[in-house]
């Protein structure tokens, strides 16, 4: 993808946004949560700032499906859709390409940090590069 990614590995866990921010020494808002949802049975990903909670109503509206048709993916669905286990799901490199939305709040930072495939690895990336490399749609996603 023409990215110059440098994966950083920690001894301590980075499996949650809070733990990752602690290990990196950045704000929780700079952590990219790669959240997988099922919308009408199809996987869709929301890249959400660590400070924010995703509003499933907003995701349903973006996907043009009913509110009740959006559910958080379970561990098996996450693994099937992305190829990775919860706690290390990266924003790209998934088994199956899926629609990706990006929390507009990520764009206030010069650099954000996302999971690099394991619960001990992360990488920094400018939000605009994250948008380009995921073909992501910038949106208002938070509660
Ligand atoms: N490595 C960190 C920071 S980049 C990370 O992966 N954070 S995360 O937020 O993207 O991944 C953890 C998320 O997985 C949680 O916010 C939660 O939404 C989701 N999750 C955790 N346990 C479950 C579960 N049992 N079922 C479905 N989703 C879960």
Image: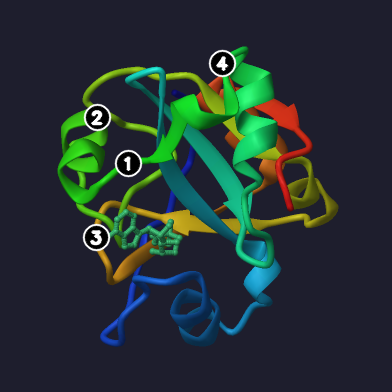
| In this view, 51 is above or below 77 | below
Residues at marks 2 and 3, CA–CA distance in whole angstroms: 16 Å
| In this view, 42 is above or below 138 | above
Residue 82 vs residue 62, the one in the foreground: 62
Q: Residues within 10 Å of mark 3 (few under 14, many from 20)?
A: some
Residues at marks 1 and 4, CA–CA distance in whole angstroms: 16 Å
| In this view, 100 is above or below 21 | above
Q: Are marks 3 and 1 in contact (CB under 8 Å)?
A: no
Residue at image coords 51%, 55% = 33
Q: Secondary structure at mark 3?
A: loop
Q: Secondary structure at mark 1?
A: loop
Q: For the residues carrying marks 1 and 2, which lies nearer the camera in this image?
A: 1
| Label annotation for residue 73 | 1
Residue to which mark 2 is pinned:
81
Residue to which mark 3 is pinned:
118
Q: Earlier in the sequence, mark 2 or mark 3?
A: 2
Residues at marks 3 and 4, CA–CA distance in whole angstroms: 32 Å
* Residue 83 picture location, percent across and down: 18, 37
* Residue 11 picture location, percent across and down: 26, 85
């Amino acid at each position: 993808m023409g990215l110059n990614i440098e994966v950083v590995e920690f001894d301590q866990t980075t499996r949650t946004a809070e733990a990752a921010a602690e290990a990196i020494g950045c704000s929780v808002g700079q952590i990219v949560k790669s959240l997988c949802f099922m919308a009408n049975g199809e996987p869709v990903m929301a890249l959400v700032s660590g400070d924010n909670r995703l509003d499933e109503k907003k995701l349903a509206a973006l996907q043009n499906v009913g509110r009740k048709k959006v559910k958080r993916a379970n561990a098996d669905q996450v693994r099937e859709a992305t190829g990775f286990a919860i706690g290390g799901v990266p924003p790209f490199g998934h088994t199956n390409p899926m629609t990706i939305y990006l929390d507009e709040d990520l764009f206030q930072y010069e650099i954000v940090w996302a999971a690099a495939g394991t619960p001990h690895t992360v990488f920094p990336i400018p939000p605009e590069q994250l948008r380009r490399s995921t073909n992501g749609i910038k949106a208002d996603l938070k509660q």
